[in-house]
Amino acid sequence: MWAIVIVALNALTGPHIRVVTKPAEVQHVFASEEACQSVLKADIPSKLKDETRKAYEDGYRRYFCVRVRDADSLSPGK
């Protein structure tokens, strides 16, 4: 399984990383990296608003697809 994460680095407080869980209309867990990347490129930038969009455009906020560790053991039949 794959998920989209947000990464931001602040000079005084350090890194801030979290998994994308909103907006609700964007899928959050993917079977392959390719599926994750396609949603990341197509949906995420268009869903950003105001300050968040500006931070993304200026490079202060990045989105990446990351594999979910040990998620394979959650699949049926394992």
Image: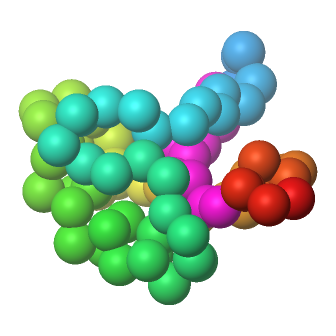
Give the main secondary structure, helix, strand or loop, of the magenta stretch.
strand
Camera-side residue of 43 and 73: 73
* Residue depicted at x 22% and y 34%: 24
User: Magenta stretch: residue 30 in it?
Assistant: no
Location of residue 49 in the rendering, given as x and y in whole percent from the top left corner: 12, 36
| Residue that lies at the very extreme toward the top in this rendered image | 13
Instruction: Residue at 72%, 56% (x, y): give it.
Output: 75
- Of 7 and 35, the residue lying toward us: 35
* Viewport quadrant of the N terminus: bottom right
Provide residue 53's location: percent of width, then percent of height: 21, 44
Is 70 displayed left or right of 29 in the figure? right
Q: Is residue 31 above or below residue 43?
A: below
Q: Please identify the quarter of the rendering in which residue 17 is found.
A: top right
Quadrant position of residue 38 = bottom left
Say left or right for 32 vs 22. right
Q: Magenta region: which residues?
A: 1-10
- 13 or 30: which is nearer to us? 30
Q: Name which residue lies at 55% across and 37% down.
A: 19
Residue found at x 32% / y 68%: 39
